[in-house]
Image (cartoon, helix red, strand yellow):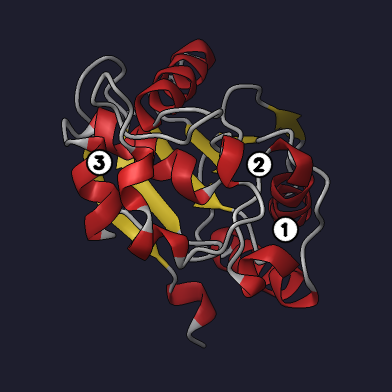
Amino acid sequence: MPATLLLIRHGETPNNAARMFRGPDGAQEPLSEKGHAEAQALGVALAARNLPNIRLYASPYLRAQQTAHRLADALGVPLHTLPGVHEIHTGDWQGRPYSAMQTHAHELIAPDGHFGYPGGESLVGVAERFHAALLGLEPQAGETVIVVSHGAALVALLARLLGRDAQQVWFSDEFHHPNTAVTELVWQGEGQPVVLRLADVSHLQD
């Protein structure tokens, strides 16, 4: 039995609700009341699956930690912090509304052609650090590795893992993860994983 990887976006925060970009200055932003409820619902859903040999990790950012603590309580497993899976640094775009993507997207194309934030990170750079963090975990056959991360970071990683153009999938919203959405993969190490579920939020529909 190969390893299973669950990639999860954190629960809602006030800035998510206000649709504002945050960067490292938002690292300590907590979940909203709704975000805590989303995380609790996900914990109940995951516990009901009786997943085998769980290892649980989360980004150092508070919103990911709070989400993952809810999962740890529901699953009865310890939580580990995983550097490298934190959200993209939005640089000069910190504090701007999401709607700026519709009017100023041209600002996000760097001279080298990579898509990213001026003064911050590119999607390719985020994918590289995220992928390196996952490889460092060395998921073993029969394990379930759960990683709680962030929306843009998950898009970047999935584009890399699935051999897609990061800029294209960003603008298509194909890999968009609502809060606490779950992507489930059969982990293949350096190879391309098999997608079992993509950005699933069925735990929020009851």
- Determine the secondary structure under disc 1: helix
- Asked whether 171 or 77 is in front, the reply is 171
Quadrant in which the N terminus appears: top left
For label 3, the residue is 167
The kind of residue tagged 1 is Ala
Distance Cα–Cα, label 2 vs label 1: 29 Å
Judge whether residue 124 can be spotted in this image: yes
Identify the residue under disc 2. Answer: 23
Question: Which residue occupies 66% across, 54% down?
Answer: 95
Q: Earlier in the sequence, mark 1 or mark 3?
A: 1
Separation of residues labelled 3 and 2 (CA atoms): 19 Å
- Would you call the spot at circle 2 few (<14 residues within 10 Å), some (14-19), or many (20 or more)? some
Q: Position of residue 89 (x, y in %)?
A: 58, 34
Q: Residue type at mark 3: give it.
A: Gln
Q: Residues within 10 Å of mark 1 (few under 14, many from 20)?
A: some
Q: Which residue is mark 1?
A: 74
Count of all numbered marks drawn on residues in the image: 3
User: What residue is drawn where x is 75% and y is 46%?
Assistant: 26
User: 127 or 5: which is nearer to us?
Assistant: 127
Q: Give left or right: position of 116 versus 82.
A: left
Whichever of callouts 2 and 1 sits on the residue coming sooner in the sequence is 2
Give the answer, above or below, for where 170 lies relative to 143.
Answer: below
Q: Residue at x 71, y 36 (%)?
A: 24
Q: Residue 205's spot in the image, x, y percent? A: 48, 85
